[in-house]
Amino acid sequence: MYREKHMTVKSHHSDENILPVRVNLPVFIGSASVIMLLGLLTVLFPQGSQQWLSKAQLWMADVFGWYYMLLMVACMIFVFWLAMSRHGQLKLGKEEEQPEFSYLSWVAMLFSAGIGIALVYYGAYEPLDHFLRPPEGEGGTVQAARQAMAITFLHWGLHGWALYALIATALAWFAYRRGQPLALRSALYPLFGERIHGWVGHLVDSFGILVTVISMVTNLGIGALLVNSGLNYLFHIPQSTHVLMVLIVVMMIVATLAAVTGVEKGIAMLSNINVGFLCLLLVFIFFAGPTLNLLNGLLQNTGDYLTSLVGRSFDVYLYGKARQWQGAWTLFYWAWWVAWAPFVGLFIARISKGRTIRELILGVMLIPLGFTLAWLSLFGNTAISLVLEHGQTLLGQVALQDPPMAVFKLLEYLPWTTITAGFTVVISFVLFLTPVDSGTLMIANLSSIGGTASDDAPVWLRVFWAVMTTLVCAGLLYAGSFSAMQTAVVLCGLPFSVVIVLYMASLLRDLRDISVQPGVAQRV
């Protein structure tokens, strides 16, 4: 067995830092080299790389837009079928095993790993952008307001969470029921057999690290921009490259410390703090804003989203300028979800041992989703109401011209602005940490060998990837080419989408095999 041949460490609970840990050299060297090369080229040639990446993104949207739309629908249908089928009752682990984390901590980590800082960044900005610059029709109207919220719900709704649930289920199944390593390659075993331990597996894991680092760099940049905007709003600290550099270093030091402490301590604690802070801010918006309007809005937004779900899932905006809008928004989101999926799925699998397939899928699909849609509805409707019904056009202008400032400008129209803006800065800082430290942990796990599926990589490897991410992000921001990396996220999502299709085929084949031979499913 692969695990027996490469076993070099014991559980990380005991002597992880005493016994040597073997690094998966092909994955480690290959992924680190490619990341450094891409980061260096982007920093040295910022304008040329941005132009090339932009052209590549437009080409991808034109040629593969239909493919992304079908992929997201197929994933959503597959995971719902899997949860409702007889396979849903199968446990991800031995039959007598209990979940490692409490339900509350598990849900908190699901949410924090899957959303992060982007929810605060886009909460008021995206609905206002769709309201003022809709894909079709006139902006600034009542119809545009309803369409804006339905589109925002689409981008943050069932499609993306289905992707996370699919990858997490596949990885957890093959790790905890089939005895494979907890790695991206393992879910391909039914299709490739022992070849997953060779170049095929190295390629999959290396590319998973690549897209995760690029996603983390984007997340780090968004977090720094948001915190910098908040500090500028509160204390007039300039929005400059030097301030961003300081913020990036501080944020990554704290995130690295959390990753070093492991899942049980640092990440679980941060996740619980995240959810508590977000709930407090959401409750404040609900009572300080137009409460009755927000209640009606949540009901209407949910109805508009559900009734338009099928149509919008297949809408490729065949004619007119809306095709460009779709490439910049919907297809960007689909590719972004795909790029985030490797590390989020791997992390969810890491914390879900002992739960059933149905519990994992429905937990991922419904619990964080409900909070996410409530957040977007309250922030989005508050912002749109201020512009549409109260004539606060300046809020809309700020959202279009300076997206990170939108949430702070929104708080200006509510009571206790200074306190809530300061609290939002704290939330932005803390909320940024969990996806980054969990991402660092998962990258380190992918580039190491040894231990059981529940073991984590050594501390030095986690620190290495944290430093690597920080250096790449700092270099891109300093060179003024951060938007190039955001475009790269979209492009990297395309090749990994092929792996997602293979995951569905692989998991389906293995589950069908055990339905024919039930005894096989009991082997771990």
Image: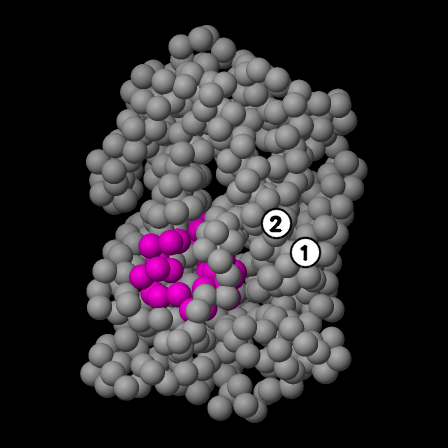
In front here: 168 or 69?
A: 168
Q: Residue under circle 1?
A: 258
Residue at 41% across / 57% down in the picture? 164
In front here: 290 or 468?
A: 290
Q: Residue furthest top?
A: 391
Residue at 41% across / 83% down in the picture? 524
Residue 56's spot in the image, x, y percent? 48, 50
- Residue 212 left/right relative to 32: left
Please give the range of residues in magenta: 336-364
Query: Is residue 304 placed above or below 44 in the rendered structure?
Result: above
Residue 301 magenta-highlighted: no
Marks 2/1 in contact by CB < 8 Å: the verdict is: yes
Query: Is residue 159 placed above or below 75 in the rendered structure?
Result: above
- Residue 164 left/right relative to 263: left
Task: Compare marks 2 and 1 and give the one earlier in the sequence.
Answer: 1
Judged by its main secondary structure, the magenta piece is: helix
Q: Residues within 10 Å of mark 1 (few under 14, many from 20)?
A: many
Residue 346 magenta-highlighted: yes
Residue 134's spot in the image, x, y percent? 37, 26
Name the amino acid type tagged 1.
Ala
Q: Residue under circle 2?
A: 270
Residue 128, visible in the rendered structure: no
